[in-house]
């Protein structure tokens, strides 16, 4: 884990992601940070996001052909994601809400450092629109 130097730009990026459940992309983070720091550049936001991902403060949610989205890792709060194939909305799925998953048959000596589970489907709004 690297030590990310704390600047006002980094503090603002962290605060935006810490308080958001929207899983914003870099442009969304940039727009939110600009309300506090109007002169912050998109490049600074990208560099900050990259550093925070490397430091384990953020996780990325990546979909082919779409902008990378970011999620703050709240200490002690483990969750996975459900992604709507219709509108692209991302929902948090708390680990406690999931049934027990047996340990996968991993190669001998393999050390798990992270688990990411994504549910792909259609949200209620998109399902209702498709039914009409």
Image (cartoon, rainbow, N blue to C red):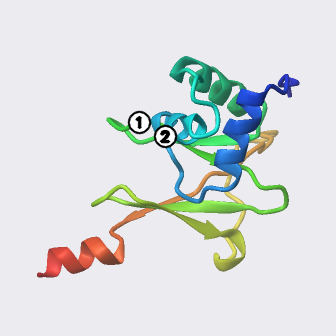
- Nearer to us of marks 1 and 2 is 2
Q: Is residue 114 left or right of residue 86?
A: right
Q: Residue at x 84, y 61 (%)?
A: 76
- Residue 3 lies, in percent from the top left, at 88, 24
Q: Earlier in the sequence, mark 1 or mark 2?
A: 2
Find out whether the residues at labels 1 and 2 contact each other: C-beta distance under 8 Å. Answer: yes
The residue pinned by badge 1 equals 67
Q: Is residue 27 left or right of residue 116?
A: left
Image x and y of residue 109, in percent: 82, 39
Q: Looking at the image, can residue 99 be seen?
A: no
For residue 74, what is the image quadrant?
Answer: bottom right
For residue 88, side relative to residue 116 (left or right): left
- Name the residue located 78 percent from the left edge and 63 percent from the top edge: 77
Identity of the residue drawn at 83% across and 25% down: 4
Name the quadrant containing residue 102.
bottom right
Q: Is 2 situated above or below 125?
A: above
Residue 69, placed above or below residue 79? above
Viewer-nearest residue: 55 or 35: 35
> Which residue was labeled with disc 2?
25
Estimate the x, y position of residue 132 in percent, counting from the top left. Answer: 11, 81
Task: Identify whether 94 is placed above or below 80.
Answer: below
- The 10 Å Cα crowd at callout 1, few under 14, some 14 to 19, many 20 or more, is few
Depth order, front residue of 17/66? 17
Question: Which residue appears at 55% of the width and 42% of the height?
Answer: 32
The number of discs equals: 2
Q: Residues within 10 Å of mark 2 (few under 14, many from 20)?
A: some
Q: Position of residue 120 (x, y in %)?
A: 41, 61
Do we see residue 53 in this rendering? yes
Horizontal relation, residue 27 to residue 15: left or right: left
Q: Quadrant of the N terminus?
A: top right
């Amino acid at each position: 884990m690297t030590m990310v130097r704390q600047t006002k730009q980094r503090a603002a990026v962290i605060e935006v992601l810490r308080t958001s459940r929207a899983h914003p992309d870099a442009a969304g983070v940039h727009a939110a940070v600009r309300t506090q720091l109007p002169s912050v550049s998109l490049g600074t936001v990208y560099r900050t996001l990259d550093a925070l991902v490397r430091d384990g403060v953020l996780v990325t949610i990546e979909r082919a052909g779409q902008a990378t989205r970011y999620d703050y890792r709240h200490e002690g709060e483990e969750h996975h994601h459900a992604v709507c194939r219709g509108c692209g909305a991302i929902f948090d799925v708390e680990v406690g809400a999931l049934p027990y998953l047996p340990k996968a048959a991993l190669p001998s000596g393999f050390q798990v450092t992270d688990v990411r589970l994504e549910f792909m489907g259609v949200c209620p709004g998109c399902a209702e629109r498709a039914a009409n």
